[in-house]
Image: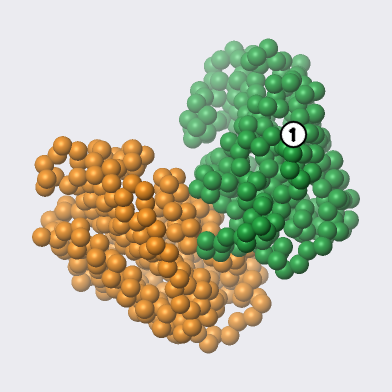
Chain colours: A green, B orange
Amino acid sequence: MLTKETITAYFQQLQDDICGCLEAADGKGRFREDLWEREEGGGGRTRVIQGQRIAKGGVNFSAVHGSMPEKISRALGLEPGHFLATGVSIVLHPVNPLVPIIHMNIRYFEVQPEGGPPDGAVWWFGGGIDLTPHYVDVADARHFHRELKKACDAHHTGYYPRFKQWADDYFYLKHREETRGIGGIFFDRLSEEEGFSKEERFAFVKEVGEAFAPLYIYYLEKHRDDPYGAEELAWQKLRRGRYVEFNLVWDKGTKFGLDTGGRTESILMSLPPEARWEYSYIPGEGSLEARTLSLLRKGIDWINYKGS
Amino acid sequence: MLTKETITAYFQQLQDDICGCLEAADGKGRFREDLWEREEGGGGRTRVIQGQRIAKGGVNFSAVHGSMPEKISRALGLEPGHFLATGVSIVLHPVNPLVPIIHMNIRYFEVQPEGGPPDGAVWWFGGGIDLTPHYVDVADARHFHRELKKACDAHHTGYYPRFKQWADDYFYLKHREETRGIGGIFFDRLSEEEGFSKEERFAFVKEVGEAFAPLYIYYLEKHRDDPYGAEELAWQKLRRGRYVEFNLVWDKGTKFGLDTGGRTESILMSLPPEARWEYSYIPGEGSLEARTLSLLRKGIDWINYKGS
């Protein structure tokens, strides 16, 4: 049987593996680790890198447990009980503006209702991975979605279309009418419904987690020597500003974490090193910046996208 | 009788007066104005300055009206009706890190419930003014609160203590356990209760609006030649990051505006030109930065504060 210990240990190992890959890809930066404990139970390992290719990146593992705070049970619509929440959460902000920002998260949640039968735990997996280019590169977008579809299809052909749309809806800045980037996949509350076993759901989540490093390192390598100057750096800061807006205004995970007493510095490791806001900035007609904005919308079928 | 037309016209005039004072104080920058209209009724005048002393500042006037959107009536706990919301809203980010950031807002809201009697309108005033120094200057903080108390006391001696505490509670970053700055005053839903007339409430709101320009210009002038270097600029960016966190995570006005289809660029004029996030940054012991952090807490009686 798949236990929470197995899942937790897997996430921890995945964090180690990903950190190793990213240090090698960066070529210089090393992760700084902060171990932290939660008073009521559990804790985490926050790891942050400031390297020569990754300007600021966080790869966090956490596993918190204990009596479920009322705020959380109310938000999730669950009965009181003993809970466990564990996962790996990553955001990387690159130095080179031609390299995209990436985010990945996989998580497992379970709660054993008070006084319920020992096998009466409620559980689910959630997660997602999405790419936020400062400049949309159609070939990258096609490649990204093709790889995600491959990972999804290995588990269920219904996954990709459903989770791709979920990502379009989730990673969306309503006040800008912009998607955060070119999307990806997002999923939540994957449990035993639809005939899936816990093992099958876990196998899918593992696939997503293991897809992350090779995918990102591919873009990091592909664009590592792309030339850029002051103009691209200025645009990168404006796009990072949008990233801040999404995370602080709309991201449910961030808001929930800050509101329920999560570790602030671990949650906000997702914020960029520097961001810029310019009032009513409109990129020049026909510019690469304007083209990027025109591609930040929901429902683009990147795999079959015909533009270049 | 005090009409909504009188109040609206006053706010508009105040915007003009304040913009004139700030242009003179900046000595170089000029406000750029964007007029905008709201499809369902009303509109605004957004004015933004990028000057030699004010790095980025917004002085906005708006007056929107029409049938009250359901989202708004639900949020405010009001019956459907025809509403008017008008006000002046200001945030200024200075160039010199020794000059504080300032925010001021005064507003009037009324709603005429559907089918109610013509004199059955519900109305209130709200507003506030608060100072966010990058480096806390105790003499400035004392002066700021003394001036605010004077403005309050001219209308009711109960105002200052109540509104000072309200500001401490409102301008608070729960996830950092930090106040945004040294506070000020905050008030909302000031109506006819407690024996106040509408004219008396309006007189107080006008006092707050008119206190703004002389107060800020005093700090702008006082610190205009204070020397600073790379260290102060780096700290300024980190503090601006906190300002972003407050506005996007906790400020009810910002969230409400973005969520109910307000004009995004007008709302987000409050964000700084540049901000920075550094993972787990802790200023050196005994530094001016550490001292500032130690003073960002609720309940400091600045008027009688003995430190220097």
Above or below, B196 against A215 in this view is below
Residue located 45% across and 57% down the image:
B267
Marked residue chain, label 1: A
Tell me which amino acid carries mark 1.
Asn
The quadrant the N terminus of chain A occupies is top right
Above or below, B292 against A23 in this view is below
Residue located 48% across and 79% down the image:
B29
Q: Quadrant of residue A157?
A: top right
Q: Nearer the viewer, residue A146 or A254?
A: A146
Q: Which residue is mark 1?
A: A304
Q: Nearer the viewer, residue A242 or B82?
A: B82
**Residue A273 horizontal/vertical position (percent):** 68, 60
Q: Say if residue B162 shows up in the picture.
A: yes
Residue located 67% across and 51% down the image:
A292
Q: Secondary structure at mark 1?
A: helix
Q: Say if residue B215 shows up in the picture.
A: no
Q: Is residue B109 left or right of A294 when viewed as pictured?
A: left
Q: Is residue A253 left or right of A27 when viewed as pictured?
A: left
The quadrant the C terminus of chain A occupies is top right
Above or below, B142 against A25 in this view is below
**Residue A16 horizontal/vertical position (percent):** 82, 41
Q: Is residue A42 left or right of B98 when viewed as pictured?
A: right
Figure label count: 1
Above or below, B14 against A154 in this view is below
**Residue A33 horizontal/vertical position (percent):** 76, 51
Residue located 63% across and 31% down the image:
A165
Q: Quadrant of residue A30?
A: bottom right
Q: Is residue A95 left or right of B102 when viewed as pictured?
A: right
Q: Nearer the viewer, residue B22 or A281?
A: A281
Q: Dot 1, crowdedness within 10 Å: few (<14), some or many (≥20)? A: few
